Amino acid sequence: MEIRDNTGHPRRWAILGVLVISLLVVVLDNTILNVALRTLADPVHGLGASQGELEWAINSYTLVFAGLLFTFGVLGDRAGRKRFLLIGLVLFGLSSLLSAYADSPGQLIAARALMGVGGAAIMPVTLSIISNVFDPRERGRAIGVWAGAVGLAVAIGPVLGGALLEHFWWGSVFLINVPVVALGVVLVALLVPESRDPKPGRVDVFGVVLSVIGLVALTYGIIDGGEHGFGRPVVWASIVGGLAVLAWFVVIERRSSHPSLDVRLFKVPQFAAPVAIVGLIFFAAMGVMFFGSFYLQLVRGYSPLETGLLFLPFAGAQLIFAPRSAAMVRKYGGKAVAAVGLTLTVISLAAFAFIDAQTPIWVVLVFYFIQGVGMANIMPPATESIMSALPREKAGVGSAVSNTIRQVGGALGVAVLGSVLSAVYRGDVEPALNGLPAEARDAANESISGAYATAGQLGPAAPKLLAAANDSFITAMHWAAVLSALVAALGILVALRWLPGRAATAPAPTAPAAEPELAGTA
């Protein structure tokens, strides 16, 4: 039944549908990419990308997206949200086209970075438009639909990616974005009204540049060290230089009257603790998802489509349990719900330290499901704490900070855990490569994908090489899983120490803007 005296836009629900399409294409792209990594590493059917290049294909998008999120939100408020959404969609579509037809890993990494620019333009203005076209009494429901679209993308992304790879070449996982973007552009132009902030904030260009340079330098050092060894000066120069630039960024932001990231918010424990939990859990989870794709497709021999279907328990658990988590928070308190969710996640991540090539696949699916349940019960209490720590007018800032930390945590997780995976794999497989031709030895020593590509040219020696590569990868996966579980376990300590309990969260449902952080499960 229609709310009396509703101040929302007459076409608000149609507009929401358009915004959901715009959001889907951003989230879908990353979830599709997970099942395409094995194909991209193949020198015949893909680009022959090294493990470091695959990590950069993920992180170039993530780092640019996270670095520009705040500033693009301000620019959208200033230049016009509809205009900025259209620009973001067009840029995302064009860069998807460039990604699909990339001739080398370097071109793909550059195109993915450009996609990050488009994604950063799309994400913040969708929420701003929702706030503008919906009556406050309907806004929470609208944002819930917005957040649910992310869960849908998580569920269908790997399956769609697997189906495309079964029937088409690897570029189809990027090309699929183009018709969706074209539909989105037409619908936005026809249905979405233009809006602006009458008092837009100033743009912190210097702060954004520092944050991107610092994050890229730090991540480059970690990835390059994992791929080529940490004994070279250039690696530590990059890591230390990146940390120094990020420290300078914090100093600049503390003094700025218009910071891109208000670092003073981190002095509030009720805000800083859940943000830290979000960063830690996505650091751990994204790293595990990275090596999980190789485990399923290479060690276990599943096709891309089968791999996508095997990820469904994780996505399905989030779709089932995330909407129920808020009720659990009201009943038991944010601290208890988050601690249980984190514990379940730690258990599922640690389980990979005991999984090998003979583990029944249903066991793997059970732990994917447990991980999905755990992560579905982390974001709502974390968001509740973030929003209750801030005045209502800063609700958008809280969501933006949490989303940025999620992206950065995920990028560093792929970089650090990917580096651990590479280093342990190389050290373990090297003795088994004696006697191979130099070119084959180098390829097999670089990654398990290289070993599989080389094996096709070795004839009778192939089974021995593949067995050694699989064993070495399993050993490396165990080490990476232990590290990921330890990082996630830090989140339990943070939750128990600083998240509010039941008494503090009783009056909870305050700011409807808290809901978008359910999208953090993407």
Image: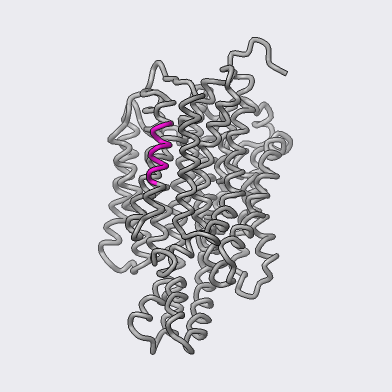
Q: Residue at x 39, y 49 (%)?
A: 112
Colouring scheme applied when the structure was drawn:
one colour
Residue 398 in sight in this render: yes
Q: Quadrant of residue 198?
A: top left
Queried whether the magenta region covers residue 88, the answer comes back as: yes
Q: Residue at x 49, y 53 (%)?
A: 173
Residue toward you, 192 or 410: 192
Give the farthest residue toward the top: 5
Q: Residue at x 45, y 40 (%)?
A: 404
Residue 426 image position (x, y, % from top left): 42, 75
| Left or right relative to 201: residue 304 | right
The quadrant of the picture occupied by the N terminus is top right
Location of residue 94 with respect to 190 vertically, above or below: below
Location of residue 454 with respect to 245 vertically, above or below: below
Residue toward you, 313 or 194: 194
Residue 406 image position (x, y, % from top left): 49, 44
Residue toward you, 60 or 274: 60
Q: Main secondary structure of the magenta part?
A: helix
Location of residue 441 with respect to 350 vertically, above or below: below
**Residues rendered magenta in the picture:** 86-95
